[in-house]
Image: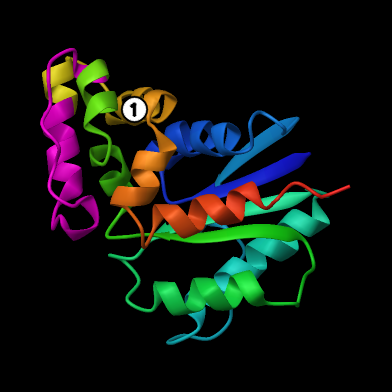
């Protein structure tokens, strides 16, 4: 299965494919990553822009003969993200399989959800973090953990946590963002 993954930037580029591959139990044959804002141009401004941009990505994935597309954006940048991504998930404009998700507040929050994975990455005991989806600045906390781990890159930190994270823990601790996203990704493979 060929899957196009669309995210917001370099951190997603390094960690989101790891998460998708793990959620699919390595059933994919090929993953490609693209940056959301660099995608198809959309006409019109105001409400519906995120929906139109996401549908543009669905069109591009179908045109490029991908079997499925995964689109993830942060709710902190798009106040109507949950509504518009749900509309894109349910849209019948393009019939390509898709998993449209919204990270609550941001993708960074997912990397604070599993204190065991965090402990392994930074090689010291980390306490359970307060509810990640309510964290007002999860990126700042991730920067601190990255510094504690002695990693040069925040992207490396995210990838390392993504490789170790317990997805049941992420589902429980990020029920509004990760849980529905994970369900949609796991539903991508065709049932024979």
Please state the horizontal and vertical placement of residue 15, each as a whole percent of the image. 44, 34
User: As displayed, is residue 164 above or below residue 179?
Assistant: above
Q: Residue 155 vs residue 184: left or right?
A: left
Q: For the magenta stretch, what is the residue range?
A: 121-145
Tell which of 38 and 160 is nearer to you: 160
| SS at mark 1 in the image | helix
User: Residue at (58%, 81%) from the top-left corner?
Assistant: 43
Query: Is residue 105 found inside the magenta-colored segment of the image?
Result: no
Q: Residue 123 vs residue 60: left or right?
A: left
The quarter of the picture where residue 112 lies is top left
Query: Is residue 136 found inside the magenta-colored segment of the image?
Result: yes
Tell which of 112 and 154 is nearer to you: 112
User: As displayed, is residue 69 above or below residue 76?
Assistant: above
Tell which of 125 and 142 is nearer to you: 125
Task: Answer yes or no: is residue 41 visible.
Answer: no
User: As displayed, is residue 72 above or below residue 116?
Assistant: below
User: Residue at (60%, 50%) from the top-left corner?
Assistant: 185
Question: Within 10 Å of the Cα at label 1, are there few (<14), some (14-19), or many (20+) other Cα atoms?
Answer: many
The quarter of the picture where residue 10 lies is top left
Q: Residue furthest right?
A: 192
Tell which of 113 and 111 is nearer to you: 113
Please state the horizontal and vertical placement of residue 76, each as a whole percent of the image. 27, 65
Please state the horizontal and vertical placement of residue 29, each as a whole percent of the image. 76, 30
Please state the horizontal and vertical placement of residue 92, each as a whole percent of the image. 75, 77
User: Residue at (81%, 57%) from the top-left corner?
Assistant: 63
State which quarter of the image contains the N terminus. Answer: top right
User: As displayed, is residue 23 above or below residue 69?
Assistant: above
Residue at the disc numbered 1: 161
């Amino acid at each position: 299965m060929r899957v196009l993954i669309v995210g917001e930037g370099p951190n997603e580029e390094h960690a989101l494919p790891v998460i998708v591959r793990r959620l699919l139990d390595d059933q994919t044959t090929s993953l490609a990553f693209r940056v959301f804002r660099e995608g198809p141009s959309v006409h019109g401004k105001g409400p519906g822009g995120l929906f139109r941009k996401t549908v543009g990505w669905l069109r591009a994935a179908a045109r490029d003969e991908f079997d499925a597309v995964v689109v993830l954006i942060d709710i902190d940048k798009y106040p109507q993200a949950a509504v518009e991504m749900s509309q894109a998930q349910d849209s019948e404009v393009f019939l390509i399989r898709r998993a449209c998700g919204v990270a609550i507040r941001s993708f960074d929050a997912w990397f604070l959800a599993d204190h065991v994975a965090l402990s392994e990455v930074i090689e010291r005991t980390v306490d359970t973090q307060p509810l990640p989806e309510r964290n007002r600045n999860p990126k700042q906390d991730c920067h601190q953990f990255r510094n504690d781990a002695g990693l040069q890159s925040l992207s490396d930190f995210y990838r390392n946590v993504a490789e170790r994270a317990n997805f049941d823990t992420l589902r429980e601790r990020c029920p509004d963002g990760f849980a529905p996203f994970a369900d949609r990704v796991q539903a991508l493979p065709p049932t024979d």
